[in-house]
Amino acid sequence: MSSLSESRVFTTGRNLVAVAGVIGATGMTLVSVAVAVAARRWLAQPDVAPRRFARRQWDLTRAAVNAGAGAWRSEGRPGNGATPSGVPVAANSR
C-alpha cells in the first residue's frame, strides 16, 4: 500500500466529507432563509395592536394580583400559624 494521501480509501473519504460539508452548508442556509422569511411575515402582520396587547397583559396581571391578594386575605397571613390552605402548621414540623 502506498502512502496514506495517495490511498484510494483516503481519497474517497475526503471526497465524501467534502460533499457532506457542502450539503450541510446548503441545508443550514435554506433553514436560515426559511426562518427569516417566517419571522418577517409574522412581524409584518401583527394580529393584535401593541396597545391592545399591552392592555390585555396589564388586565391579566391585575387579575392575578387581585386573585392572589384575595386568597391571601381569606386563607390567613404568613406568620399566624396557618398555611395557604388554612391548615395550621405543627410547631415541631419546622
Image: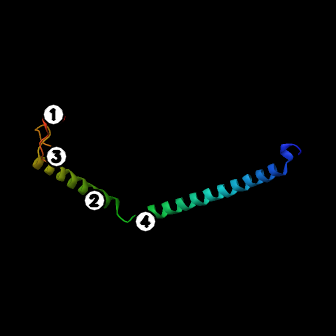
Callout 2–callout 4 Cβ contact below 8 Å: no
Q: Residue at x 68, y 58 (%)?
A: 23
Task: Give residue 68's position: percent from left, percent from top.
Answer: 18, 50
In space, the residues marked 2 and 4 are separated at their CA atoms by 19 Å
Residue underneath mark 2 = 56
In space, the residues marked 2 and 3 are separated at their CA atoms by 28 Å
Q: Which amino acid does label 3 sit on?
A: Pro
Which of the 4 image quarters holds residue 49? bottom left
Whichever of callouts 3 and 4 sits on the residue coming sooner in the sequence is 4
Residue underneath mark 1 = 92
| Residue nearest the viewer, comparing 37 with 12 | 12
Callout 2–callout 1 Cβ contact below 8 Å: no
Left or right: 3 in relation to 89: right
Whichever of callouts 1 and 4 sits on the residue coming sooner in the sequence is 4
Q: Which amino acid does label 2 sit on?
A: Arg
Which image quadrant: the C terminus? top left
Nearest to viewer (mark 1 / mark 4): 1
Whichever of callouts 2 and 4 sits on the residue coming sooner in the sequence is 4
Nearest to viewer (mark 2 / mark 1): 1
Nearest to viewer (mark 2 / mark 4): 2
Q: Which amino acid does label 4 sit on?
A: Gln
Q: Which amino acid does label 1 sit on?
A: Asn
